[in-house]
Image (cartoon, helix red, strand yellow):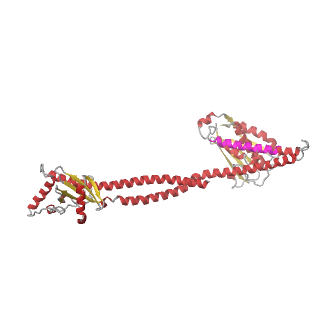
């Protein structure tokens, strides 16, 4: 189940990342493509505008634009004694006397593009003339005629000739002539390297996020895995603990039922066994309910960790008096086990919380100390203030807790001595007492810790905020 949950977690992350990467990188690629195409279109428009500006600068009044271009070329050629007529589909030598200028660079050109273009002027009889003044490229002669015919028949504006690999811009003047500028479609392929780069960058990004999601899925689901493991262990341990008393009860009931005519007194042995095991089950179930309630109240206002306002609403408890009263109750128990109980309790130590629960906390620690203390040793309960907190400790000498067991002593149903027999009574006999104590301490905004060594014995220390 956890493996499926982890796979779903990774799949969800990768799906979201993939959508974001595709959207962002796709947008960047689309912008690169648009920018490349716009650069070509801008070059075509600049070339046509340059021809119009030159014609306007000639100050020819109402003379047609094409006529101005031809007239300007003829005037230059007369000085050289040249003059030829131009037919459709051929280059006009009257324009070839002006060498084509290379693209301009520098001088803060205001964003003007340098994409190579070829500009042709078309008269009303479809004769075409190469306009060298605005031309920075030449068209392959094999496709020139086809390109011009298609462009002449097209409406004004931008267009493309896929078979010829050209973009073009056509503009008709007020006097009826046309200007057509051509640019190679490969000039707009600047977006392709960007697209390839984005593709591999996207794959790399997804690979990185896959690795990160695998790592974080383990980290994020670790608490879930721990909770699942603890829950499974809790159910297994609870079933095991309930199995024994139920078996005893069923066995005693079966024995008592074999002799229906027997008196209650003659069956008292079996009835006492049923009662003892029933009380044991009741005690364990009550402890389990306490733990369940404690878990449910973890986020309630009783938790002092959640808000200072909630702590102020809780009653003030004299922890010194509470600890002394609990010690008195255990003096007889300690005497029967040849133990001594002493206290080192500071006066006036007060905390805020539930008095009954805090009393149960002290009782659990004293009961646990009595169970595992060696005969003729001393149990010490200490209470003092330290660093703005109340510090309550219960120390006993006996069998120490192994270092590998210390982190688990507050786990439910955990026992350091796996082979020991069950105690006759007490909540801790089920391995739930210390878990309840830890829950009470945490519920009151405090903490509990355990330490054990041969020299210092075993000490359980509870730290609570002072009132």
Specify the quadrant that holds the C terminus.
Answer: top right
- Residue at the far bottom: name it: 142
Residue 138 can be seen in this image: no
Above or below, 265 relative to 237: above
The picture quadrant where one finds residue 90 is bottom left
Name the spot of residue 178 as percent of width and height, x first. 19, 54
Q: Is residue 251 magenta?
A: no
> In the visual, does 60 lie left or right of 390?
left
Relative to the observer, which residue lies in front, 311 or 414?
414
Relative to the observer, which residue lies in front, 278 or 387?
278
Specify the quadrant that holds the N terminus.
Answer: bottom right
Relative to the observer, which residue lies in front, 336 or 255?
255
Query: For the magenta stretch, what is the residue range?
Result: 275-298
Q: Looking at the image, which residue is at 60% across and 55% down? A: 3
Relative to the observer, which residue lies in front, 391 or 435?
435
Name the spot of residue 17 as percent of width and height, x first. 48, 53
């Amino acid at each position: 189940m956890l493996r499926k949950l982890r796979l779903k977690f990774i799949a969800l992350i990768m799906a979201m990342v993939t959508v974001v990467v595709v959207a962002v990188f796709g947008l960047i690629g689309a912008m690169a493509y648009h920018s490349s195409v716009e650069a070509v279109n801008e070059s075509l428009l600049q070339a046509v505008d340059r021809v119009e500006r030159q014609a306007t600068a000639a100050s020819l009044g109402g003379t047609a634009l094409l006529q101005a271009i031809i007239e300007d070329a003829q005037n230059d050629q007369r000085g050289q004694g040249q003059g030829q007529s131009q037919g459709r589909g051929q280059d006009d030598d009257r324009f070839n006397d002006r060498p084509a200028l290379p693209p301009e660079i520098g001088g803060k050109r205001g964003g003007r593009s340098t994409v190579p273009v070829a500009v042709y002027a078309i008269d009303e009889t479809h004769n075409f003339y190469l306009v060298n003044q605005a031309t920075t490229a030449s068209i392959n002669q094999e496709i020139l005629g086809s390109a011009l015919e298609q462009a002449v028949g097209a409406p004004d504006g931008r267009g493309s000739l896929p078979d010829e690999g050209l973009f073009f811009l056509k503009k008709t003047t007020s006097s009826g002539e046309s200007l057509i500028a051509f640019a190679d479609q490969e000039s707009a392929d600047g977006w392709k390297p960007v697209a390839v780069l984005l593709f591999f960058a996207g794959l790399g990004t997804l690979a990185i996020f896959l690795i990160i999601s695998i790592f974080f899925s383990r980290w994020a689901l670790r608490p879930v895995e721990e909770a699942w493991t603890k829950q499974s262990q809790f159910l297994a341990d609870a079933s095991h603990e309930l199995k024994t008393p139920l078996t005893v009860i069923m066995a005693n009931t079966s024995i008592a039922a074999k002799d229906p005519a027997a008196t209650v007194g003659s069956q008292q042995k079996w009835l006492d066994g049923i009662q003892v095991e029933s009380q044991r089950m009741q005690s364990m179930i009550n402890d389990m309910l306490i733990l369940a309630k404690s878990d449910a109240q973890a986020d309630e206002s009783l938790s002092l960790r959640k808000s200072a306002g909630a702590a102020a609403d809780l009653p003030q408890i004299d922890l010194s008096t509470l600890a002394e009263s609990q010690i008195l109750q255990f003096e007889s128990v300690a005497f029967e086990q040849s133990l001594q109980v002493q206290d080192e309790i500071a006066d006036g130590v007060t905390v805020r919380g539930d008095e009954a629960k805090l009393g149960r906390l002290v009782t659990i620690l004293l009961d646990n100390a009595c169970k595992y203390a060696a005969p003729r040793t001393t149990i010490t309960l200490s209470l003092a203030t330290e660093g703005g907190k109340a510090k309550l400790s219960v120390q006993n000498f006996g069998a120490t807790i192994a270092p590998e067991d210390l982190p688990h002593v507050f786990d439910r149903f955990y026992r350091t001595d796996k082979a020991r027999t069950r105690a006759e009574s007490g909540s801790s006999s089920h391995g739930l007492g210390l878990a309840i104590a830890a829950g009470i301490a945490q519920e009151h905004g405090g903490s509990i810790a355990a330490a054990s060594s041969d020299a210092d014995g075993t000490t359980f220390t509870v730290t609570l905020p002072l009132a």
